[in-house]
Image (cartoon, helix red, strand yellow):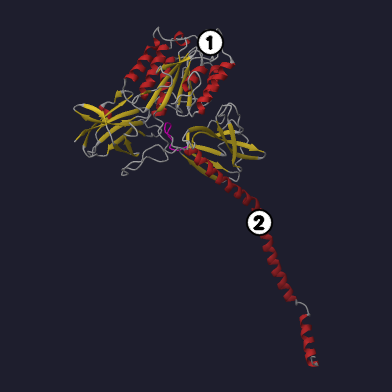
Amino acid sequence: MCSRAQFHKAKHQSGQRDRGMTLVELLITVTILGIIMSSLSAAMIVILRTERPIKDHLSESKDITFLQAWIPNDLASASSRNIDPLHQPSPRTTLPGTNVLTLNRADISTSDVTTNYVVSYRYVQVGEEWQLQRYEIRNVGLTTQTLTKVGVAHQLAAPPVTWNPTQSPIHAVTVTSRNQVVLRPIGEDVQVTFGSGEEFTTGGAGLSSQDQLPTDYTGGIIDPSAPPTRCGGTVTVVLDTSSSIPSQGGATSLVNAALGFIDAFSGTPTYLRIVGFDVSAYSYYPTTAGQYVNILNPSTNLTAMRTKVDNQDLSNARWGPGTNWEDGLWQAFRTTSGTAFSQLPELVVFISDGEPNRNRTNTPNDGDARFNTSDLSRAVTAANYGRGTGARIVGILVGNDASTTNQGRMKSVVGNVVWNGTGPTNPGNASAADFFLPANSASFAQLGNVLRSISAAVCGGTITLQKRIEQAGALSEATGTWSYTTDVGVRDLDTSQSSSATFDFTFPQGTTTRTVQITETPKSGYTFVRAECSSGGIAIPASRLSTPTDGSPGVIITLTPDEAVSCLMVSQPS
């Protein structure tokens, strides 16, 4: 029990606690609360204002992850690309939106069998959102075709009011060739613009996976981001030999153009085959179906091919009364029974002067020599089969029947990307074009310019090296590994793996020549003596060749962008 004094003391202290706040204390409290509430209000406003941008940035970050995951990988395996906004990669499926970038890709299965498929990036509107969608098509054009879709980016910039889907969507996605050279772009850069205005750039290039790494790195290595050289491989020319060509006076021009095409590839690691077609198709040369002529070096087969072509304008030539597009394209890839050849073409050059008026169901004596849609649709199917193997098919239409209607028919078979060049010195987009039309379509004389433009796009600006050993005045093929250095790097020629090595050289726009020095790494037991260089089977004049001023073994060549140079690097035993 507390005393009276303790009770009064406690009561007095209690009264002090309950007496309330003074005016000064109240003002201080209100002021502090005002400051706190203002800060909280400002924070809430900031949070509310930034909530949407935060969500946008999170979405963009996710999109960037997908873009970086898909695009470089697709480009790394691409053998060709198409940026025509109207391009549709398969006749069996109409993809939505506008084409941004369509790629042909090689795919190696677990059984080491190489197949090819198509990847198409499309700019598509979904509701109020603009997306970049990736479509993967396998077995293109066949009944077994499959299609898968992935949404790669969902926050792309919306188009301006002046834009329409037939135009490239450069406001949202731009595709730029690396190394701005017509003949030799090295990969692509893809810039994506988001709705927020932020930009992201990715890209890549086909890897030179088949190149041998050098043993000597003093000159650097070939650019690993550069795709394998376009020069070489298997090429099939599908040649119209119908009677309408000589009737228009085009036989001789056709022959000369074909000879020029052969010569342009001579000295390059190219295997060439010619298929003829009129009422039906046939193996023009070699006459054994599916066989090719190696035109890297002069040979009896190469001479026989040129002779067969040269005789085509004589009276004993085939010149049948029909134009069977389907069979010509069919026999570029498979036998008459439908079995695929063991060696398939990588490039098919399809030349015709008219419209298809036959198909593979017609007999040689079929009297229906008029165009019908079945003849065309079957040709489209045959071309799609070829593209499904990974081949590039280009078409050339020439002659009096090269009307707008027939141009459309040819495009439906080979593709819609039209050549914009004028000749081998101005090949334009020949490396990517599907459809070629001479400046004067009725003139067969201009066909040679078109064919040389294609060969320049494939092999222009290249130097192919072979190694020879000279003994007693005779040349023989070398053995072992020989290393060569140029200003684009070092490459080994391993004769047990390949008989030649090809260097690709780029030319800035407007540049018509380039000086190239090729230096051979000295090899014990041998002395380098000279280089024998030619272009199109004709020796390069001495004015364009010289020896290195520093005394190193090799050659200096003045190269032009529209030619493929072939050099024999000759040594003698020491």
Q: At 50% from the left edge and 19% from the top edge, which residue is drawn?
A: 337
Residue 262 is situated, as x and y percent measured from the top left of the image, at 37, 21
Q: Nearer the viewer, residue 161 or 337?
A: 337
Where in the figure is residue 537, as x and y percent of width and height? 31, 23
Question: Within 10 Å of the Cα at label 2, are there few (<14), some (14-19), or many (20+) other Cα atoms?
Answer: few
Q: Which residues are magenta?
A: 177-184
Question: Which residue is denoted by mark 1 in the rendering?
Answer: 363
Locate the C terminus and report the quarter of the image it occupies.
Answer: top left
Q: Quarter of the image holding residue 370?
A: top right
Mark number, residue 47: 2
Query: In which quadrant of the rendered image does the N terminus lie?
Result: bottom right
Predominant SS along the magenta part = loop
At label 2, the amino acid type is Ile
Q: Is residue 249 above or below residue 141?
A: above
Tag 1: residue type?
Thr
| Residue depth check, mark 1 versus mark 2: number of the one nearer the observer | 1
Give the Cα distance between marks 1 and 2: 78 Å
**Any mark on residue 303, and which?**
none
Is residue 118 located in the magenta-colored stretch of the structure?
A: no
- Which of the two residues, 395 or 559, is positioned nearer the viewer here? 395
Name the element at disc 2.
helix
Can you give x and y, in whole percent of width and height, for residue 247 in the image?
A: 46, 8
Q: Secondary structure at mark 1?
A: loop
Looking at the image, is mark 1 or mark 2 earlier in the sequence?
2
Q: Is residue 513 visible?
A: no
Instruction: Inspect this view and state whether residue 23 appears.
Output: yes
